[in-house]
Amino acid sequence: MKPHTSARARAVAAAPVKLIWIATLSALLVFAQAVNVFAQGAPESFAPLAQRISPSVVNITTATTVARQTGPEGIVPEGSPFEEFFREFRGPQGEDEQMRRSSALGSGFVISEDGYVVTNNHVIETADEITVEFFSGRELPAEVIGTDRDTDIALLKVEADEALPFVNFGDSDEMRVGDWVMAMGNPLGQGFSVSAGIVSASGRALSGSYDDYIQTDAAINRGNSGGPLFNMDGDVIGVNTAILSPTGGSIGIGFAMSSNVVTRVVDQLQEFGETRRGWLGVSIQNVTDDVAEAMGLESTSGALVTDVPEGPASEAGIESGDVIVSFDGVEVEDTRGLVRQVGNTSVGKTVRVMVNRDGQTETFRVTLGRREQADMAAAQDMPGEDAPEEPAQSEVLGLTLSPLSSELREELSLGEDVKGLAVLSVDESAEAYEKGLREGDVISEAGQSEVQTIADLETSIEEAREAGRTSLLLLVRRDGNPRFVALGVAEGDSGQ
């Protein structure tokens, strides 16, 4: 007789099987969801998007007329008996110059139905003639509306009898590392071309004050310059500008100026024909750890003011040595952020600037000037009166220093308004050398006090030691550009 199996026992035996099936189904469901997400992120084909936006992308051809000397001038002296012999090399009708044409290729895109076209400034900078070629093969001449060398952006205009297809700008700040992007343009002069990739990084800075590049691995080559970088909605989120490559060809490191920078530039070029950026009127540098220690600051946030020429900040009362911690209600993290924020603020706007001065917070109201006008006027600064010093040399903090004499000013090409101590040499084993001080530098301040003699510097060193500080903040000028450097002044440091 077989043993009786109860219903409860059978249920218990079946439980592990059910659990296995539930776990399997759950895993399959998760896998299916992952596949679905991946499918949404990676389109099956870029063809529909490329077909929709291609009519708005253009090739740009430029022509430059260059004069070429072909006559005897420069070959034989005037009046030479050989002059007539070389006359056959002259141009027609006795002209001494022949004209040759130089052409270049780039890319661009239409941003309005009435024919405004965006490209890179370096594509059209030296051009005498600019031709825009559309995807259909149609060609139209273009005129330059305005350019901005700081962001390498140019705005062109073509005239057409009908409304032109165009694309819109997207929000580059919404792009995430890993998002799909598509680049279009005219690589190496081969005609319209499409490449796809992802956002590799954002917020890249190359060399300019207003740089905000999107880095992508989408193939970008010469000729792609000025072309658009699209998101998957077909909005322009960058203007392809540069590549990093040891060979000159794409290795998957390309840079596109972010659309949020470009739109501000384009709006100003369209309205004024030029850019009009805000100008605070200060020279600044980042706050390093040793500078923060020397100044008694709790953090390295902010922008340290190194110089305040005549301008908005000076009129408001901001001084060299102040640390700007807030501009127009926004906290300042570093110099790059401050430069961009000031540049993006309207000329003539009055803003609140909060600074840290001697451990205390002060707020100033500053009415911004215009950066472009300040740049043009910078070369016209008038020198002040000279304060001659008795020549002397001394070794302090690993530096051989001397007050500025007439001979030193002439040797170092310094204006009469420059005051301080000239660096004659730097001990290569000293901290000063490691921090970048070199022969020809001028130390104009120590501990945020003006120095013109060796005694002034030694007094500042002693005051820093008595205050319990291990570093002394020096204001160093090189080629007219100021920067702060903190050097150790603990006992025993002064000679090295």
Image: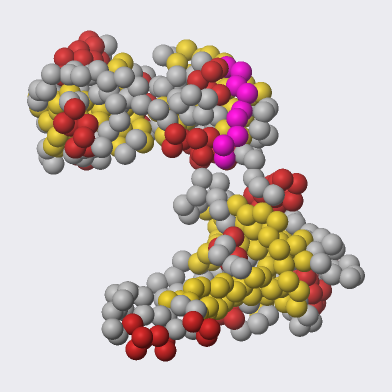
Point out the image quarter for the N terminus.
Answer: bottom right
Q: Is residue 85 left or right of residue 95?
A: left
- As displayed, is residue 418 above or below residue 192? above
Q: Residue at x 56, y 72 (%)?
A: 64
Q: Position of residue 165 (x, y in %)?
A: 84, 69
- The total number of labels drawn is 0
Name the residue at the right extreme.
Answer: 162
Q: Is residue 368 magenta?
A: yes
- As displayed, is residue 419 above or below residue 34? above
Q: Position of residue 277 (x, y in %)?
A: 62, 39
The residue range painted magenta reads 364-373
Q: Is residue 470 magenta?
A: no
Judge by depth and name the residue closer to the eye, 405 or 148: 405
Q: Is residue 288 left or right of residue 363?
A: left
- Judge whether residue 136 can be spotted in this image: yes
Q: Position of residue 470 (x, y in %)?
A: 24, 22
Judge by depth and name the residue closer to the eye, 428 or 62: 62
The image quarter containing residue 386 is top left
Q: Residue at x 84, y 70 (%)?
A: 160
The image quarter containing residue 276 is top right
- As displayed, is residue 296 above or below residue 60? above
Q: Main secondary structure of the magenta part?
A: strand
Q: Is residue 72 left or right of residue 226?
A: left
